[in-house]
Amino acid sequence: MTNGHEFAGKRVAVIGLAATGVATARVLRDLGATVRVYDSRAEADLSPERVVEVRGLGDGVTLALDNARVDWERTDLMVPSPGVPRTAAPLAEAVRRKVPVLGEIEVAYRIARAPILAITGTNGKTTTTALLGAICRGAGIATSVAGNIAEDAGVRLPLIQAAVLAPPEGVIVAEISSFQLEWVSTFRPRVAAWLNLSSDHLDRYPDFEDYARAKARLFAFQTPADIAVLNRDDPGVTRYSQGAGKGQRWEFSVRDRVPIGTCLEHDLLVAAQGPVAVAHETKTVPLMPRSEIPLPGLHNVANVLAASAIALAFGIGRDVIRRAVRGFPGVAHRMELVATIGGVEYVNNSMCTNPAAVSASLEAVRDRPVVAIVGGKHKGGDLSEMIAALQDRTAHIVLIGASAGEIGAALDRESRRIGTGPVVEFAETLPGAVQRAARAARPGDRVMLVPGCASFDMFTGFEQRGQVFRDAVKRLPQLEQRPEESRINQ
């Protein structure tokens, strides 16, 4: 951590006029840098509010749009927004010219005064990050929840902004994506956790190995003074975390006892405190019964174990953890019960954006028959896990989005192979899909939005997709109740 002195007087090219790019420009300007923000799009294709915001930052910040050439003679440093791929022309040219490229989280780490607790994984990041934030706040610590998470009213706090705001005695709890880890060179979280690994973002990465290696960079610069919290049950995490850094290794597991970390034993969450010298056995102490977790599914037990392990590694007590977990309401667009209409539950799980998430979501709710709304933009990779889960757990599926045909064909092949399968129909819009699902559902059923795909073919993001689902449900007739409890319970 340098607290920003190294950026004073630097001429910085920020690539991408996303929320992170705007925040980066503002912070670097305040640190004394001269900033030029580049975006390949024309002004008419950009958010007017962001354009106005950047232009309002003053003389130290300028804007270059519509594929403007980078002024290399006046560029000491480049900071790309996470959404800009490594193959983008300005980044490739910066590497060729040996111009330093720092990711936004790398800059954030260098200027942060508070320690960073970082979480990555293919699924469960937002729930685990939000829960860890609640635990830290419950411990009386000034906590900034930041990164790739929209915690408050759907507004993300970029890590670089949290780095400026968080006091030295506070903590930054950060959700970190693989995109954000591509350009780190010293980023060193005090505690870093890897929740799980499955196929995702293969529209960005050339192969699964490249995606996994990007995730593993979370630990690359940790020292023995830091802690890496790893999912013992996930073979991908185990494989790709080997040799990824020098941090102390903690684990969490829903299957096995771990040497140090957290695990599930006979429906009791316990903390493992390392081997006792005399008995050579791991000592465990109770955290809480599984029944006290308000979120459904074994995958959420794993999320709670991960958040608890991070909190324990950071020195937070078991009683604080238990209180925070018991009072945790969950997060929007994750297994969110919108309403019950005519005896049918309508569940918004818009953040379910890959095949593994579909499988975990359906496994968590075996108490009712499911009518599933699936589809969007498939991000590449194997669909077999999702197809198997849909075949096993649903009787009726409504497909939407750019990949509806691909998913429908895969479902048809599997139904032909095994001789049975769910009814499959298609809808042009999400509101239309909700109406079709409502007609198919019977009292006692559950209509679930479990897209298994990205949202960008039809929406600005998963948040908008979830809101459209909510609005469509509210327009259905016979509204029976608006549930006080906003999560699905087991």
Image (cartoon, helix red, strand yellow):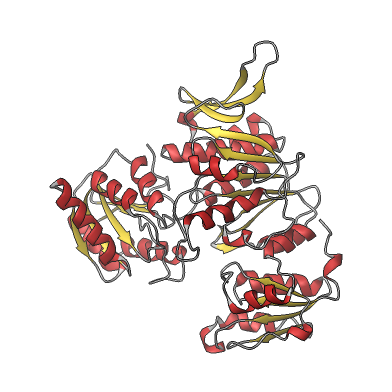
Left or right side of 262 for 203:
left
111, above or below 444, in the image: below
Residue for point 64% across, 30% down: 318
Residue with the most extreme front position: 96
Foreground residue among 400 and 73: 73
Q: Residue at x 66, y 74 (%)?
A: 22
Q: Quadrant of residue 149?
A: bottom right
Relative to 241, say whether 217 is above or below.
Answer: below
Q: Residue at x 37, y 61 (%)?
A: 470
Image quarter of the N terminus: bottom right
Quadrant in the picture for residue 282: top right
Left or right of 447 in this view: 209: right
> Residue 135: x and y, percent?
63, 41
Along the line of sight, the residue nearer the viewer: 347 or 277: 277
Q: Residue 232 location, x and y as percent?
A: 53, 35
Front-lying residue, 430 or 178:
178
Q: Is residue 42 visible?
A: yes
- Residue 441 visible in image: no
Left or right of residue 378, residue 226 in this image = right
**Quadrant, the C terminus:** top left
| Residue 143 picture location, percent across and down | 70, 50
Residue 393 at x, y percent in the picture = 26, 44
Lateral position of residue 395 relative to residue 161, left or right: left
